[in-house]
Amino acid sequence: MYRLTAPCLFGLEKTLSFEIKRAGGTNIAMKDGRAFFDGDESVIAKMNITSSAAERVQIVLGEFNAFDFDGIFEGAKNAPIEEFAGREDAFPVAKGHSLNSKITSIPAIQRTIKKALAERMKEKHRAESLPESKNTLPVHFLLQKNIMLLTLDTTGPSLHKRGYRSRSGEAPIRETLAAGMVDLAHVRSSDVICDPFCGSGTILIEAAMKQLNVAPGMNRSFIASRWDCFHKEIWEREFREAKERVKNENIALYGFDKDGDAVKLAEENAWKAGVNKHIKFLKREIKDFKYPETSVKIITNPPYAQRMLTEEEADGIYRVMGKRMLPLGKNSLFVITSRESFPEIFGKNADKERKLYNGMLKCRFYSYFGERPEKAYDDPAKK
Ligand SMILES: C[S@@+](CC[C@H](N)C(=O)[O-])C[C@H]1O[C@@H](n2cnc3c(N)ncnc32)[C@H](O)[C@@H]1O
């Protein structure tokens, strides 16, 4: 059993906690956009392969007070790196942040941790020199309020990199956030999904993957699967089982965008993700929006005057959305925007509203539920 940790975007903690339980993780504690949990190697593999919300999965090497460099050195020297890294393995202190702490210099912290870990590796492996020429075990750190969290990264390139989006459009949404929106919209495989501002298609691709039970990390690799301290057969089994869980269902999704290049890119990305046959993409402006079927779940991130358009232009788009989409009837709408005036301009208050972060940008996720489909009349005379 290892103590593990996984960061996520603020607002996706509940989704992440559910995914950890599903992967067999225990003793879960959530803290500011990060989960801590216990798990063995198969939990590490499962979380990397199946989590839609985690940004990466890390093994906790130590957590200690770090008010000065001596504290950092001593704490890092107690981290059992040799249990994972063999004598010839590389252990770069690859990534780190310092937040609200006395020590702020990232390169100086990196050097101190590296020195302490190298001393420990030499002692524990009884080695005079460390060639660092075999596998790579990246060490990450987070110094927050003078407390150091030292971890070993099992993921490699961040988990939002599913492998289907090599090129992205003008203001793409991160895959983990798109998947979180799909989760908050309670997408089922019977739902018809539409994104009228689909850009590079991320929300629709994540929705289709969820509907077909395609694990987000199923088609990529992870750095820890190559480590000698782990078992290749465990990773192979988890990949195989994820592939066996994929459903073969008929699903329907629609993506519109006014930009023809974005539509082409979305088609390309959907093809790479293997879900293109389920999604119909069309070049269409919001002023021409029509519900593509009778009961549709719209999940979207329209422009919100951060990376594209002015506030007036964004508000103009929200006004048109209201005109084309209201009344909702049997359709429902889930929209993320940083513009708090959205409901007023759209013309309807949301049934539910929650905070969700797009990177560091505080946004709101508005849920509008349409009329529930009427229950079939159950004639007691026929019983
Ligand atoms: C924030 S981006 C969506 C990004 C998308 N979720 C992705 O992951 O790539 C907004 C999109 O709205 C499109 N757009 C802007 N104005 C529009 C309009 N009037 N009608 C339809 N699409 C519009 C832009 O071309 C852009 O692709």
Image (cartoon, grey):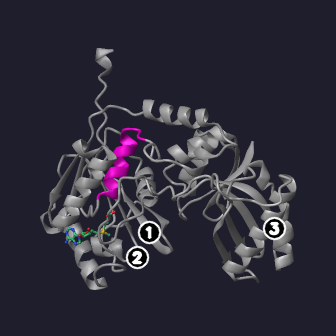
Q: Amino acid at mark 1?
A: Arg
On screen, residue 320 versus residue 87, left or right, reads left
Q: Position of residue 303 (x, y in %)?
A: 30, 73
Residue 312 occupies quadrant: bottom left
**What residue is rendered at 42% in x and 58% in y?**
175
Circle 2: is it few (<14), some (14-19), or many (20+) Cα within 10 Å? few
Quadrant the C terminus occupies: top left
With respect to residue 258, does 274 lie above or below?
A: above
Instruction: Look at the numbered discs 2 and 3 and tell me whether their residues touch, using CB distance below 8 Å.
Output: no
N-terminal label among 1 and 3? 3
Q: Secondary structure at mark 2?
A: loop
Judge whether residue 208 is colored magenta: yes
The percent position of residue 305, horizontal first and vertical second, equals 33, 80
Q: CA–CA distance between discs 1 and 3?
A: 44 Å
The residue where tag 3 is placed is: 116
Count neighbours of disc 1 (C-alpha within 10 A) and say few if under 14, some if 14 to 19, many if 20 or more. many
Question: Which residue is label 2 attached to?
Answer: 340
Ligand 1: give its quadrant.
Answer: bottom left
Closer to the chain start, of discs 1 and 2, is 2
Report the disc number at residue 364: 1
Looking at the image, which residue is at 32% across and 31% down? Answer: 248
Q: CA distance from mark 2 to mark 3?
A: 48 Å
Of 133 and 142, nearer the camera is 133
Question: Residue 70: x percent and y percent?
Answer: 86, 76
Give the alpha-carbon distance from disc 1 to disc 2, as whole Å: 7 Å
**Which residues fall within the magenta stretch?**
201-214
Please rate how many residues cluster around mark 3, counting C-alpha atoms within 10 Å: few if below 14, some from 14 to 19, many from 20: some
Residues marked 1 and 2 touching at CB (< 8 Å): yes
